[in-house]
């Protein structure tokens, strides 16, 4: 235990972790002096309050919201600016210490686990909204700024940032995982909404992926380094600023719920709505198990059948046209009359119920844990994969309500599992592998928005193939030749 011990005993305990990670074989007194030097360097950069060896703090930073077990770092540092991030990275680089960036810990694939020990860079103190350009529809933020905090800051400007993964995640963390969410069908994912990034590389070098201070709406200048780092999950560098596209808040927003007799009818409606050119803002699918869970958890009363949650944005007139077209399409596919949510309070309650799907699923089996896995397939294959997935769940006696961003072909299984039942946990692991391979067989991907992290490295190799993976490994080796940046994520460890 590190908490409650004297500083000397803390140093000795952390020293052992560092020695195991880095195979230092010099004498004990020399090792102690070296460790003392490292911690002294950390303190000189961000002060004693900016360095933590406490066990509780380390464990908090060694796990996200996934089922992957906690791997705490050896020490957590709390830089306050990019210069401190750079200085700390240089110390880690000089001493060959792994670096694990940490935003809010809301990831779902074990991306913050310190599997090789090392130093967690907790970026919560870098929480400034910088350089808002209302007339240009862009803003620059530091990594401690979350999605909700930015939109609260923008409230009186008539602008908003629409990418909404559900969790109140760090915006730089969302860039690092290429997050998306319910609005992606209209506004795109983080890849489409990041204009520029400030990144600290493994050796402490600071780069700007589109040039320092640059924020053009489009560019064809050179390699697209911005999108190289979007989705890199901290394996190539630490994102310390991101410049984002903003959008005008629509004049009118209307939400609706529509029930269907079958999954096929719901997905057919979705395809036809998109084919008709309706610029729908959100179109979310919930299967019968999920809508039942939401009804019970959020005190709703929707029919327990496949269901679409929809939202329309635009002028009053354009929204009315969108709604009329969409209603005609859904009714031609056997959909029910729309249940409307026109005012802000009712719409907020409706979408809160959708975002609370995780907790609604957990409430189906009190005392159990939840694990969310996602895949993405071409729209035409969505009914087939959902039907087969539901059959798989029933056959293997698993609880897994389905919710999806149906306009993108992306859906989630919210697996509810007994943490004290190893056999059930094993069945869940096998199920998630079958689900991903089912998506790959249908020309899809093993993850639409959660990322690879620890859990889907083998599946990524199957998806991309050996030559593409070799190119990815070469990029990693070039930018991080000592494999210090978030080691063990996305790519399998290289053979010695």
Image: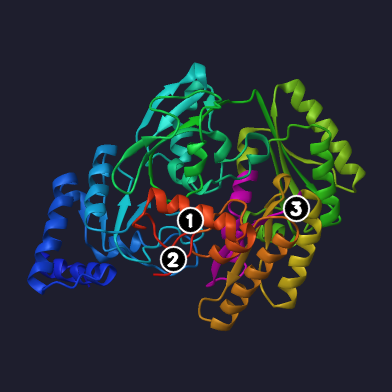
Q: Which residue is mark 1?
A: 473
Q: Is residue 25 above or below residue 489?
A: below
Kindly check if marks 2 and 1 are in contact, taking CB atoms under 8 A apart as contact: yes
Mark with earlier residue (2, 1):
1
**Magenta span includes 380:** no
**Gap between marks 3 and 2 measured at Cα:** 51 Å
Tag 3 secondary structure: loop
Nearest the viewer among 91 and 336 is 91
Q: Which residue is mark 3?
A: 302
Position of the N terminus, as image quadrant, is bottom left
Q: Which residue is mark 2?
A: 494
Magenta segment, which residues? 350-378
The answer to whether residue 455 is left or right of residue 206 is right
**Would you identify the image quadrant in which residue 193 lies?**
top right
Mark with earlier residue (3, 1):
3
Tag 2 secondary structure: loop
Kindly check if marks 3 and 1 are in contact, taking CB atoms under 8 A apart as contact: no
Where is residue 294 shown, x and y percent of the image?
Answer: 66, 56
């Amino acid at each position: 235990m590190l908490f409650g011990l004297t500083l000397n005993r803390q140093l000795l305990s952390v020293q052992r972790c560092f020695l195991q990670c880095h195979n230092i074989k010099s004498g004990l007194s020399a090792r102690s002096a070296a460790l003392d030097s490292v911690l002294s360097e950390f303190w000189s950069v961000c002060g004693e309050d900016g360095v933590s060896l406490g066990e509780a703090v380390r464990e908090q930073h060694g796990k996200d919201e996934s089922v992957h077990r906690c791997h705490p770092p050896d020490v957590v540092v709390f830089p306050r600016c990019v210069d401190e991030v750079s200085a700390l990275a240089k110390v880690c680089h000089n001493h060959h210490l792994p670096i694990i960036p940490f935003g809010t810990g809301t990831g779902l694939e074990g991306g913050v686990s310190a599997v090789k020990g090392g130093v967690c860079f907790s970026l919560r103190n870098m929480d400034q909204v910088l350089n808002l350009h209302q007339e240009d529809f862009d803003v620059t933020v530091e990594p401690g700024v979350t999605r909700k905090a930015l939109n609260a800051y923008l409230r009186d400007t008539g602008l908003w940032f629409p990418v909404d993964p559900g969790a109140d995640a760090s915006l730089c963390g969302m860039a690092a995982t290429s997050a998306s969410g319910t609005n992606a069908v209209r506004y795109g994912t983080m890849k489409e909404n990041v204009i520029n990034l400030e990144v600290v590389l493994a050796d402490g070098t600071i780069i700007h992926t589109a040039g320092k201070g640059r924020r053009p709406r489009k560019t064809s200048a050179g390699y697209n380094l911005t999108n190289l780092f979007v989705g890199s999950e901290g394996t190539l560098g630490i994102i310390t600023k991101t410049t984002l596209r903003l959008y005008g808040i629509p004049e009118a927003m209307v939400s609706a719920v529509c029930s269907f007799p079958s999954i096929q009818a719901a997905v057919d409606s979705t395809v036809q709505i998109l084919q008709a050119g309706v610029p729908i803002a959100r179109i979310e699918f919930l299967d019968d198990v999920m809508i039942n869970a939401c009804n019970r958890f959020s005190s709703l009363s929707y029919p327990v059948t496949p269901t679409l949650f929809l939202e329309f944005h635009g002028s009053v007139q354009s929204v009315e046209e969108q709604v009329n077209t969409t209603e005609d399409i859904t009714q031609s596919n056997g959909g029910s009359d729309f249940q409307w949510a026109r005012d802000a309070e009712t719409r907020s309650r409706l979408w809160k119920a959708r975002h609370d799907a995780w907790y609604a699923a957990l409430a189906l089996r009190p005392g159990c844990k939840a694990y969310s896995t996602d895949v993405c397939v071409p729209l035409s294959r969505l009914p087939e994969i959902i039907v087969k997935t539901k059959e798989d769940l029933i056959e293997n006696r698993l609880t897994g309500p389905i919710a999806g961003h149906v306009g993108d072909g992306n859906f989630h299984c919210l697996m509810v599992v007994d943490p004290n039942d190893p056999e059930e946990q094993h069945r869940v692991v096998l199920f998630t592998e079958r689900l991903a391979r089912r998506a790959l067989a249908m020309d899809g991907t093993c993850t639409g928005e959660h990322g690879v992290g620890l859990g889907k490295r083998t599946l990524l190799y199957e998806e991309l193939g050996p030559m593409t993976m070799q190119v990815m490994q070469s990029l990693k080796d070039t930018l991080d030749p000592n494999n210090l940046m978030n080691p063990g994520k996305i790519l399998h460890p290289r053979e010695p």
